[in-house]
Amino acid sequence: MFRSLGEPARLAILRHLALGEHKVVDLTAHLGLAQSTVSAHLACLRDCGLVTSRPQGRASLWSLSHSAPLLEVLAAAERLLAATGDAVALCPTYGEPADR
């Protein structure tokens, strides 16, 4: 699950779904990503149990499966990054390259 949250495009999709249900075409327009990319990310998020879909005509409407707990995790991650952001950025394994 945390691996799925580590991808910026998936986080952006989750942020949009936090606002309400969206079709893939809406997400592609908002995010500027290809339809196949958005669909692949949604499949990953669905497999992790974070999103769900329901049919509407020929399309599907996507939404968060467990919005309150998911938003709590994301808010906690933001608080932790606010407290440790410099340590994460300077981490020799996962931080930014030193030549930047």
Image (tube, rainbow, N blue to C red):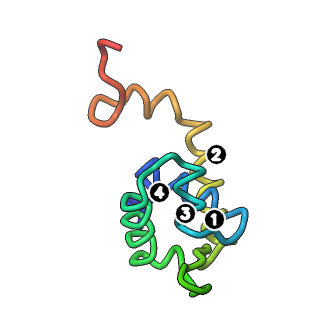
State yes or no: discs 4 and 2 in contact (Cβ < 8 Å): no
State yes or no: discs 1 and 2 in contact (Cβ < 8 Å): no
State yes or no: discs 2 and 3 in contact (Cβ < 8 Å): no
Q: Amino acid at mark 3?
A: Val
Q: Which residue is mark 1?
A: 17
Q: Residues within 10 Å of mark 3 (few under 14, many from 20)?
A: some
First in sequence, mark 3 or 1: give its number: 1
Relative to residue 90, is residue 59 depicted above or below?
below
First in sequence, mark 1 or 4: give its number: 4
**Callout 1: SS:** helix
Name the residue: 30% across, 22% down.
97
Q: Which residue is mark 2?
A: 79
Q: Residue furthest front?
A: 58
Q: Amino acid at mark 1?
A: Leu
State the image quarter where residue 26 is shown: bottom right
Q: Nearer the viewer, residue 86 or 22?
A: 22
Q: Which residue is mark 4?
A: 10
State yes or no: discs 1 and 4 in contact (Cβ < 8 Å): no
Q: Amino acid at mark 4?
A: Arg
Which is in the foreground here, disc 3 or disc 1? 3
Name the mark on residue 25. Answer: 3
Q: Amino acid at mark 2?
A: Arg
Task: Name the image quarter holding the C terminus.
Answer: top left
Q: Residues within 10 Å of mark 1 (few under 14, many from 20)?
A: many
Q: Residues within 10 Å of mark 4 (few under 14, many from 20)?
A: some
Q: CA distance from mark 1 to mark 2?
A: 21 Å
First in sequence, mark 1 or 2: give its number: 1
